[in-house]
Amino acid sequence: MELKGKKAVVTGASSGIGKAIAKKLAEEQCQVALASRSLGKLKELQKEISSESIVVEMDVSKTESVKSAFEKIYNEFGSVDILVNCAGIMPLTYLKNRHLDEWLDTIEVNIKGSLRCIDAVIPSMTKNKSGHIVNIASVDGKEIFKGGAVYGASKAAIIELSRAMRMELSPEFNIRVTAIEPGTVETSLREDITDEELLEDKDYAGDEPKLKAEDIAEAVFYALSQPEHVNVNELLVKPTGKA
């Protein structure tokens, strides 16, 4: 599908995977709404990309922030063709160490944040009977590991949500839905971890093979660029050499 001129919203666009996705969509001449809490970083990114773009401050953990950001987006773009839900946090913890606030924040951002953005684009996409929602999940939503209980549960929820969304939104409204499931990616997400015991565990040394953020951007582009009659439901991407 031709992406030139499509209106896209990328959450978590200020760094890591979100930034790489925003840059890729801009290269493909989409109009991109760069959404994040970090306005300074977004403005720097806006200077880098050549495509028409706007910057919107958005904290996906707060309903009013999401509503306000999408009001600006609709005022500028009129409609939304593509939503990439990429904002997320990964404060891995051992359950025995009781990081309740971090667990709740994980659910608030990774699940509820995605739902807030999905809610904001559904009216536009159902009216136009067209659109594509890409949810950035994780291999951790399928392959759970010690220390990743809450994060993995949040990503498992996104995978299941994406499946149900496709079932509901595709047949009646022609809305495509894709869950992208990256393996380990070289980003700053692991900086969210505060559990000292987990950080000292040799299993989290961080020397395993890793993907680049740009690899995930290419996966998103692959899903988006398929013909309109093709829905890439799930795409699992792992680094070569990872067990």
Image (cartoon, rainbow, N blue to C red):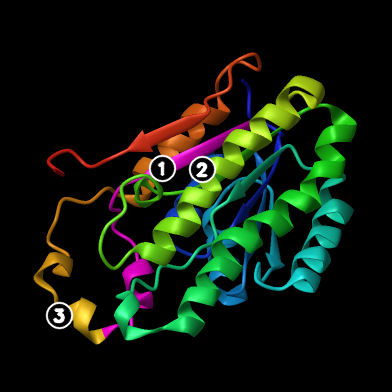
Q: CA distance from mark 1 to mark 3?
A: 27 Å
User: In the rendering, at what x and y percent does residue 86 appear?
Assistant: 54, 54
Can residue 127 be seen from the camera position used here?
yes
Q: Is residue 57 left or right of residue 148?
A: right
Q: Is residue 210 left or right of residue 20?
A: left
The region drawn magenta spans: 176-195
Residue at mark 3 to residue at mark 2: CA–CA distance: 30 Å
What kind of residue is marked 1?
Glu
Residue 20 lies, with reference to residue 112, above or below; the image says above
| Residue at 71% in and 34% down | 5
Residue 138's disc number: none
According to the picture, the residue beneath numbered tag 3 turns out to be 200
Q: Earlier in the sequence, mark 1 or mark 3?
A: 1
Q: Amino acid at mark 3?
A: Glu
Residue identified by numbered label 2:
159
Secondary structure at numbered mark 2: helix
